[in-house]
Image (cartoon, rainbow, N blue to C red):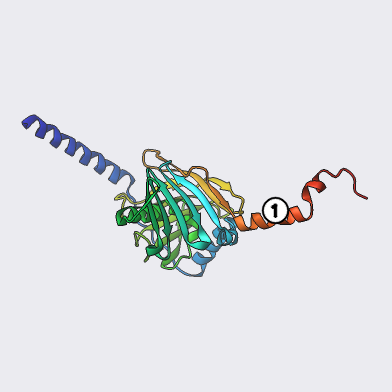
């Protein structure tokens, strides 16, 4: 018993020491920046590079988070199908009471599973579309000098799951995000970074990340096979092509 207590104490002290080393090595204070026109202009340039107008019109997004949580988001309808393990939730993001919960394909009433699905979606969708949210209600934008270049500091002053979190977006010369640094409640070390460099241009025209690499231990967050499309537009396009006999056009060799 005494040996067990001794080993437990030593392990605890070791973990405290490791945390202290990491904290004093990597912890950064939240930078101060200036709000106003310049910060908003920088945010707008980033959104333009990301094709924000196409994002607003995108109808369906699909992805997974670390291969564990799977999503199909009908953005215009505010409906998300969230799946993990034996659970599936048809989550209504605007009217939660209209959501449906299934366990092993059987419809049930389970507030715990519903709350989990909402929490998963809030976190995992942020890792997919965070750059598009810089003008969301409750956000504050500041311009910060980082390595002698302009960077965009976003603070979620209200709303969301963790109000008060801040992210410093690092941009390339074309204003495309390459990484961000985080000051968030769930991570006690401030300034840890994650890459936003593995982008994919989707069918709807928007750019989405396929993975992130965290500065802490080089951990990777896979986003799975990301997709974004406008299903209604695709149906309309196919109908038009059928009417104008597009297949016959493709097989035509000569036109006069």
The residue lying toward the viewer, choosing from 90 and 202, is 90
- Horizontal side of 48 relative to 130 (left or right) equals right
Residue that protrudes farthest toward the left in the picture: 2
Which residue ends up furthest to the top in the rendered image? 3
Q: Taking the image as drawn, is residue 183 in sight?
A: no
Tag 1: Cα neighbours inside 10 Å, few (<14), some, or many (≥20)?
A: few
Residue at x-position 90% and y-position 48% = 255
Q: Residue 126: x, y in percent?
A: 44, 54
Dot 1: what SS? helix
Q: Residue furthest front?
A: 106
Which of the two residues, 183 or 50, is positioned nearer the viewer here?
A: 50
Q: Which residue is mark 1?
A: 238
Residue 30 position, x and y percent, is: 36, 57
| Position in image of residue 171 (x %, y %) | 52, 53
Q: Tell whether 128 sits left or right of 219.
A: right
Q: Nearer the viewer, residue 41 or 62?
A: 62
- Location of the N terminus (image quadrant): top left
Q: Quadrant of residue 52?
A: bottom right
In the picture, residue 185 is in which quadrant?
Answer: bottom left
């Amino acid at each position: 018993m005494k040996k067990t207590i001794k080993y437990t104490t030593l392990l605890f002290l070791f973990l405290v020491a490791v945390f202290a080393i990491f904290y004093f090595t990597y912890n950064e204070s939240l930078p101060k920046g200036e709000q106003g026109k310049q910060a908003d202009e920088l945010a707008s340039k980033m959104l333009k590079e990301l094709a924000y107008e196409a994002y607003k019109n995108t109808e369906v997004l699909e992805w997974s988070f670390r291969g564990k949580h799977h999503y199909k988001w009908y953005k215009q309808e505010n409906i998300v199908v969230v799946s993990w393990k034996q659970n599936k939730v048809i989550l209504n993001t605007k009217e939660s009471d209209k959501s449906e919960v299934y366990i092993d394909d059987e419809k049930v009433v389970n507030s715990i599973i519903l709350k989990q699905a909402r929490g998963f979606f809030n976190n995992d969708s942020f890792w997919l579309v965070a750059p598009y949210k810089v003008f969301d209600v409750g956000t504050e934008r500041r311009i910060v000098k980082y390595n002698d270049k302009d960077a965009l500091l976003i603070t979620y002053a209200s709303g969301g799951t963790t109000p008060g979190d801040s992210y410093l977006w690092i941009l390339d010369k074309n204003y495309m995000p390459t990484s961000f640094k985080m000051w968030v409640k769930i991570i006690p070390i401030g300034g840890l970074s994650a890459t936003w460099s593995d982008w994919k241009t989707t069918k709807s025209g928007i750019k989405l990340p396929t993975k992130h690499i965290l500065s802490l231990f080089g951990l990777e967050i896979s986003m799975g096979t990301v997709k974004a499309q406008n299903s209604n537009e695709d149906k309309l396009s196919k109908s038009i092509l059928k009417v104008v006999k597009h297949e016959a056009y493709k097989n035509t060799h000569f036109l006069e």
